[in-house]
Amino acid sequence: AVAASVTEVTPDFLRARGVRAVMVDLDDTLLAAGSDRLEPPFRAWLASLRAAGIPVVILSNGTHSRVARWAEELELIGLALTGKPWGRAFR
């Protein structure tokens, strides 16, 4: 299945496919690249996953400081400079 936005990937959609956790990129997935603002639909999406007990991890090629800032604000685990899709952290 293809989604236009992560906000279309609901907890029910994930559960129906046996998905128990989500890895999500920061830039151009949760935030516009270089942005310092998380739009309300993305906050609501993260809250819906949290309420459903589905853990979310930020997996980003972004800098440590940028990823750490957002991981702290969103109360998520954040991995920076992962080298995805070929890096060790991604695998």
Image (cartoon, rainbow, N blue to C red):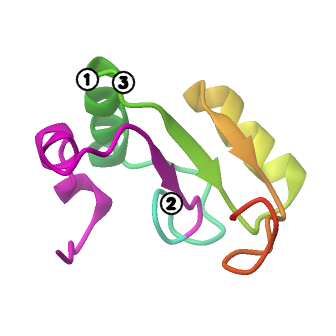
Q: Nearer the viewer, residue 13 or 35?
A: 13
Mark 3: amino acid = Arg
Where does residue 64 sit, x and y in percent of width and height? 88, 51
Q: Residues within 10 Å of mark 1 (few under 14, many from 20)?
A: few
Q: Nearer the viewer, residue 78 or 16?
A: 16
Secondary structure, mark 3, is helix
Q: Residues within 10 Å of mark 2 (few under 14, many from 20)?
A: some
Secondary structure, mark 1, is loop
**Magenta region: which residues?**
1-27
Image depth: mark 2 or mark 3 in front: 3
Give the CA distance from mark 2 to mark 3: 18 Å
Residue drawn at x 80%, y 56% as measured from the top left = 80
Ranked by sequence position, the earlier of labels 2 and 3 is: 2
55 on left or right of 34: left
Q: Quadrant of residue 16?
A: top left
The residue indicated by pointer 3 is: 50
Image depth: mark 1 or mark 2 in front: 1
Tally of numbered tags? 3
Does the CB distance between marks 3 and 1 fall below 8 Å? yes
The residue indicated by pointer 2 is: 31
Give the CA distance from mark 3 to mark 1: 5 Å
Q: Is residue 16 magenta?
A: yes
Mark 2: amino acid = Leu
Give the CA distance from mark 1 to mark 2: 22 Å
The residue indicated by pointer 1 is: 52
Give above or below for 62 relative to 79: below
Where does residue 22 sit, x and y in percent of width and height? 44, 47
